[in-house]
Structure formats: C-alpha cells, structure tokens
Image (cartoon, grey):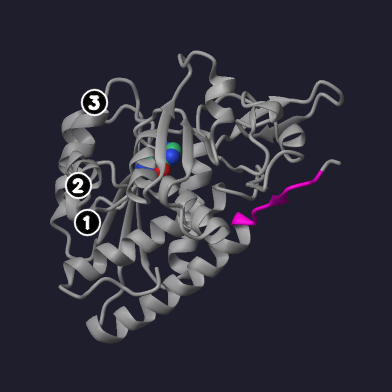
Amino acid sequence: MTTIGKTIDGKAFAAVLRERVAEGVADFVASQSRKPGLAVVLVGEDAASGVYVRNKGKMTVAVGMESFEYKRPASIGQEDLLDLIEELNGDPRVDGILVQLPLPAHIDEAAVIAAIDPTKDVDGFHVVNSGRLATGQKALVPCTPLGCIMLLKDELGDLSGLEAVVVGRSNIVGKPMAQLLLAENCTVTLAHSRTRDLASVVHRADIVVAAVGRAEMVKGAWIKPGATVIDVGINRVTDTEDGKARIVGDVATAEAIAHVRAITPVPGGVGPMTIAVLLRNTLVAAHARAGLPEPVGL
Ligand code: GUN
C-alpha cells in the first residue's frame, strides 16, 4: 500500500504570521507613537534580488511598518556602502537593516555584515548573532531557518530526540538550521555536497531539511517512511517535455510524497515564510530597542 504524505502550506502559515505581526505593530505604534522601520539595501541590478526587495517593501508596509529602500549601483565602493550602513545604524527610525545578498564581487560581504549594528541585524548574519545562537543565548536568528523551525513545530509539536539531517552548510540556511534544531533537542547531522553515502545519511532522518541548491538532488527513496521533509531549494530548470522554465526544490517531491509524513512544496512552502519571519524579526528588534519585553505569540 502506498500512502501519500501531506503537503505543508507555508503560504497560509506565513499569512497568519503576518497577521500576528500586524497586530504587534499596532500595539507598538500605540505605545511608542512611531512605526517600526525596516531598511533594505540593494546593490546592483540582479533581477531575482530586485523581485525579493519589491515584495519585502510591499509586505513591510502591509503590516504597518515603515519601509526604507536604498538602491545603489553595482559600482558602489566598499567605503560608500559602509558609510550608508553607519548612517542606518544611527537612524532612530530604523529598527532593522537588511543588506540583500549576494553583493558584487569587489565588495567584502563579511565586512559589510560586520558593520551592521547587531541589534538591527534582522537577518541574523552578524557574528554576534550567530555566536549567540550557537551558545544558546537570545539572538536575532536568520529568517529562512527560523521559518523552517516554525513549520516543523506546527507539524510535529515537540522535536526533542528526533534525528534531523540538514543537507547544505551555508551561513544563511544550513549552519543556523543545525543550531536551531540542536536547540530543539534534535540529534543533528549537518551533511553537504561532499558527504559520503548521502542516501543512507538522509535515510536515518525523522526530519530532513534540504538546502543545497541542487535541483531535485534528494531522491524519494532516500526518505525514511514517515519522515517530515523541509525543502528550502529554489532552482530554475527547463522542463524536458515542454521546454518551459519551472521552479523546483532540492527534493524530488513527486517521488518523496509517497514516503513522507509531510513535505513543503516548492513554490508555496518555505519561500513565503522568509519575509514573514523578517517582519517578525523587525518587530522583535524594535521591541528590544525600545526597552519593551519581547512581543508574545511570535
Ligand atoms: N539573499 C538570499 N536570501 C537572503 C536573505 O535571507 N537575506 C539577505 N539579506 N539576502 C538574501
């Protein structure tokens, strides 16, 4: 008998999260007489980044926050970019600063991230925040992995003692994902493109998080029956049958669906969560900067 697993509706979950953020924003405005503010810095003309930044701006305004956008040409010098970050660090209207990655090759990405005030680092990329996360202290946490944890807890409840395998070791997703799963008392394996016998490593997992950036690399037969699968991949491929461009994840979903308890679809799974969590992080940062306790229920 083949059972078909369920798909996790990240789009609906993200909409609910944005509603809760909007309520928190209204309370913040009532007590502080100002809106929380998010500044987004976009360098260059990357088309995908441009789309993300437009969506971020729209949703920031939709939850009642102030959106500040700073577009700079790809030719901007490192010092000018660092000056802009300094200006935003000192701007009292700005609670969150996000520098859209990737940056052009002549810019030192680590130096730019290091220049962001850690209390405004709503991406959670600053070493102060990644260090705090790794040592179990309160931190601003990267948006995509935090969104994945929210979906997992919604599906599974308590994650304690579960085997979790993360495939992919990026600073944006894989590494913080592993730290968050560890904080939830999972037994965590951080696998990657050089892992030997990845199939059998993945087959141990009750939770699989795929974030390698390779189209449908994780095969259905690798998944332990009843596992929950979070697919972070967004890969553009050309369909071999109709020649049309499609977006697929890092998991071969059509195969995997028969093995899983639940899986996030691509699109409509993890993707919509990232911006919703970014707005959540901005509200959390605004509370901390105003000396208020953390917003509840987020
Ligand atoms: N580029 C791709 N994902 C992200 C993200 O989460 N934050 C930033 N700043 N840039 C990105």
Q: Is mark 2 within 8 Å of ligand 1?
A: no
Q: Which residue is mark 2?
A: 132
In depth, the one of 284 and 6 nearer the eye is 6
The reply to whether residue 243 is in sight is yes
Residue at the image point whose x is 69% and y is 51% from the top: 7
Q: Could you say whether the residue bearing mark 3 is in a helix, strand or loop?
A: loop
The residue that mark 3 highlights is 108
Q: Quadrant of ligand 1?
A: top left
Residue 147, disc: none
The reply to whether residue 100 is in sight is no
Residue 50 vs 103, above or below: the answer is below
Q: Earlier in the sequence, mark 3 or mark 1?
A: 3
Quarter of the image with the N terminus is top right
272 is higher (above) or lower (below) than 165: below
Residues packed near mark 1 inside 10 Å, few (<14), some (14 to 19) or many (20 plus): few
Closer to the camera, 16 or 77? 16
Q: Which residue is mark 1?
A: 138
Q: Is residue 36 left or right of residue 219?
A: left
Q: Are marks 1 and 2 in contact (CB under 8 Å)?
A: yes
Q: Which residues are the magenta region?
A: 3-10
User: Which residue type carries mark 3?
Assistant: Asp
Measured as percent of width and height from the top left, residue 284 is found at 29, 65
Q: Earlier in the sequence, mark 2 or mark 3?
A: 3
**Marks 2/3: CA–CA distance:** 23 Å
Point out the tag, 1 or 2, that comes first from the N-terminus: 2
Q: Is residue 3 left or right of residue 55?
A: right
x, y percent for residue 281:
34, 59
Return the residue nearer the eye: 166 or 267: 166
Q: Give the prevailing secondary structure in the magenta stretch.
A: loop
- For the C terminus, the image quarter is bottom left
